[in-house]
Image (spheres, helix red, strand yellow):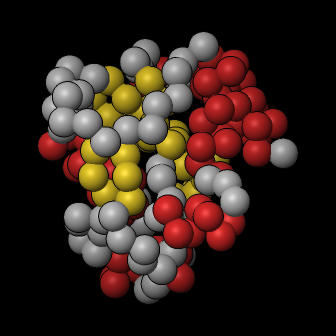
Amino acid sequence: MGVGLGALMAARWRLYPELGIPHALVPVPLHPRKQRIRGFNQAHILAEGVGRRTGLPVLTLLHRRTNDPPQARLPRESRKGRLGLAFEAATPHLRGARLILIDDVATSGETLRACAIALTRAGAEDIRAYVLAMGTT
């Protein structure tokens, strides 16, 4: 189902020219413990579906350092800045990279912002986000 939803995201890609032409897709990572329990990372599955249809590589360029509760469970005012150091780039050598973060749901945007900060610190030049759904909480 996830790969199919990723394919749907890819089919709608052309409706969003502001995404530009990236070098790669970067799924938002789960904490390793959470991924072991769940058995999969939904953002990675979506990214694979988008990648298959667009021909873009899916790269694991981020690691989740902290195992925080999901942002969607917190009040909006508690989310801002909470994830500042939750993510780190897998490599410090991303100079000039144009990347698209892929995630399943964005609510406040704080997770995507924290991921973008980590990639920028590693030298990425342009980071955009593409999500399956937008939440309102």
Vertical position of residue 18 compared to residue 31: above or below: above
Q: In the drawing, does residue 36 fall left or right of residue 112?
A: right
Residue shown at 28%/44% (left/top)?
Answer: 89
Residue shown at 24%/71% (left/top)?
Answer: 81
Is 19 or 65 nearer to us in this picture?
65
Please provide percent x and percent y for residue 15: 60, 25
Please provide percent x and percent y for residue 31: 47, 64
> Which quadrant holds residue 86?
bottom left
Quadrant occupied by the N terminus: top right
Q: Is residue 16 visible?
A: yes
Is 20 or 92 nearer to us in this picture?
92
Residue shown at 69%/19% (left/top)?
Answer: 53
> Which quadrant holds residue 108?
bottom left
Please provide percent x and percent y for residue 26: 46, 37
Vertical position of residue 38 compared to residue 15: above or below: below
Q: Is residue 136 visible?
A: no
Q: In the drawing, does residue 118 fall left or right of residue 21?
A: left
Please provide percent x and percent y for residue 74: 46, 84
Vertical position of residue 40 compared to residue 78: above or below: above
Vertical position of residue 41 compared to residue 127: above or below: below
Residue shown at 60%/36% (left/top)?
Answer: 47
